[in-house]
Amino acid sequence: MTDFLAPLNPAQRQAVEHYSGPLLVVAGAGSGKTRALTYRIANLVLTHKTDPENILAVTFTNKAAKEMKERIEVLFAEQEAQARHGKSLSSLPEYEQTKLKSQVYKTITKYLWIGTFHALCARILRFDIEKYQHPAGYQWTKSFSIFDESDAQSVVKTIVTQTLNLDDKKFNPRSVRFAISNAKNQKLTPDELEQEQPNYRGRIIADVYRHYQKALAENNALDFDDLILTPVYLFQQNEQVLAYWHKRFRHILVDEYQDTNRTQYELIRLLATNGEAISTYKNWHHRSVFVVGDADQCLPSDTAILTPQGTVPIQALKVGDEVLSTVGQAALYPAKITHIQQGRFTGTLWCVRAGIDRGRSLAIASCGAPLTTF
């Protein structure tokens, strides 16, 4: 077998060849983070003979997951081409390339768990959701539906305007839906949300949250936030279920780690350590958790931020101001700024044009500007 790690630079190779234990890889844009993840999976299978079913790789978009699978397929097909024909994959006839890739899919990539948090958690729940015990006694079956954002907003609007007969100008259904989503991402139940925000508005939103969860259960449905939150609760209350998935996923890889929220972090911790505190877990024999991210993903001064009143430069925002964001969903939601963290970058900032909107650059960075992160 040829040295398939030869295309990697020394830093990438060091990360890829790490085998047991936790590893955090911090790298900037364009430094080959996805390449390192891809080659690491190949190295686990080819060098360490890891069963593909024991590998879990989490990405943040379906596109990234698809790209990772395609890269892995090409990597393995390249090794097969060298072993069988003594030639590179690209030099073979197209039908032979397709044949090799198909074989790789059937024997390797088909069994790898590669996908977004939501897609992978949905797969887990299709096996085990009936073992989940909701505090209010709600139950779901393995054939549960997944409500998209339009469905979720419709349910919240019905609860606000009809079930609770609230003023939808004071309790905008869209804002209330966002508040519920934010609570779930922080792993807060309706009761915990009410304790954290004991004012009148907080109590009302917590009440909407309770009715919302009941409505989801009555429809045998989960929203996108539940897809991640429910496995976390399930793992915390059922040691046998957690032990199974902990044993199943011996090597866990997470891309764009800086974007994980509290619930996503807790999910990875539970799977990696079987529920034990990360600081005390020692059983890393033939086991690893490998996360890559960019700690310096910041926004320079003069970055245009969308607010309900229009766009404003980022440096003009202050705590308490409201901004609009997709928060990982398909629609825009209002959210208040709770804190601002500023730093200063001493290197060169490049102008990056991500696309053109009516002749204007969508993203421009100026040199030597102070950086702001939220």
Image: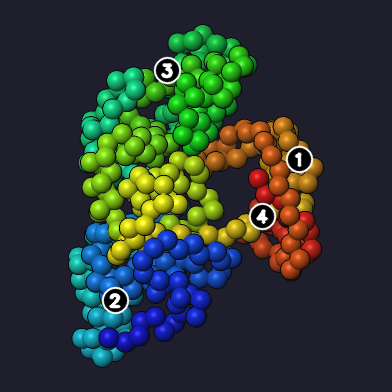
Residue 259 position in % (x across, y down): 53, 50
Mark 3 residue element: helix
Determine which residue is flagged by label 3: 211
Determine which residue is flagged by label 1: 317
Given residues 189 and 140, the one toward you in this image is: 189
Is residue 36 positioned above or below 120 on the image?
below
Q: Amino acid at mark 3?
A: His
Residue 328 position in % (x across, y down): 51, 43
Q: Assess disc 4: are there few (<14), some (14-19) or many (≥20) residues with their C-alpha within 10 Å of its C-alpha.
A: some
Mark 2 residue element: loop
Residue 360 position in % (x across, y down): 71, 55
For the point 51% across and 8% down, which residue is it? 165
Q: Which mark is residue 47?
A: 2
Q: Amino acid at mark 1?
A: Leu
Given residues 328 and 232, the one toward you in this image is: 232
Given residues 50 and 325, the one toward you in this image is: 50
